[in-house]
Image (tube, rainbow, N blue to C red):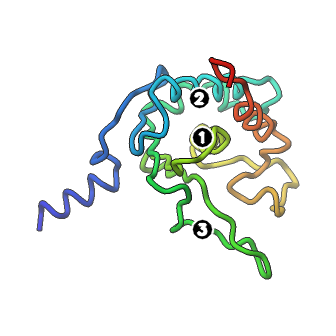
Amino acid sequence: MKLTLLFVLLTMLGCATPVRCVTTCGLQLSGAETWTCPQFQQFEDLTLRAFASPRITDARFATACQRVQGIQVHVRDTNYLDELREDAGIGQRPFEVLGSTQCDLGLVEIGHLSLRGTFAHELAHVVQACTPIPPPGWYPTKLEGPQHAGWMNAGIQEAIYQAANAPLDGGT
């Protein structure tokens, strides 16, 4: 019984998943081998470079490298995180969830075919410790729910777009 409980706790904390590589800022890659370690490092570099934009008004992004240290990025064997499928509202089909961040566990999970935009999006949650600061007068919209409060006006959404679309080394 104690051994089973220990296994469950280790799995929940991500400790049961071997880490394949660690980036210069301390992000840990585990799970499906969709990304190589050099690609993972490059994705971190591009994302944190975009997060250094002077257009981002959330001061926490100035220390993004320190804020992502020790976070495990686990790539799932499936593309979507089906257990997190979200209902888009009455009369609309649910939208697929490509990534999830659990700040309390230090864990980011992404689908195995997820693009760099998903990675950058989830790192934005990490940098904000899963606690966005909504600007005065902000209210949720279809495009910007509570967990993304103020991302458009704070320049965060633009930085995610830049990270997702920056050219990779090797021209791709």
Dot 2 amino acid type: Phe
Q: Quadrant of residue 160?
A: top right
Taking the spot 44% from the left edge, 53% from the top edge, the residue there is 77
> In whole angstroms, how far apart are the C-alphas of marks 2 and 1?
8 Å
Relative to 115, is 157 on the left or the right? right
Q: Which comes sooner in the sequence, label 3 or label 1?
A: 3
Q: Is residue 158 left or right of residue 117?
A: right
Assign a secondary structure to mark 2. Answer: helix
105 or 166: nearer the viewer: 166
Mark 3 residue type: Arg
Taking depth in this image into account, of 64 and 113 the one nearest to the observer is 113
Residue at numbered disc 2: 43
Which residue position is annotated with label 3? 85
Instruction: Identify the residue at image location x=27%, y=57%.
Output: 9
Q: Along the horizontal axis of the image, is 171 left or right of 141?
A: left
Q: Residue furthest front?
A: 171
User: Which residue corresponds to mark 1?
Assistant: 119
Q: Residues within 10 Å of mark 2 (few under 14, many from 20)?
A: many
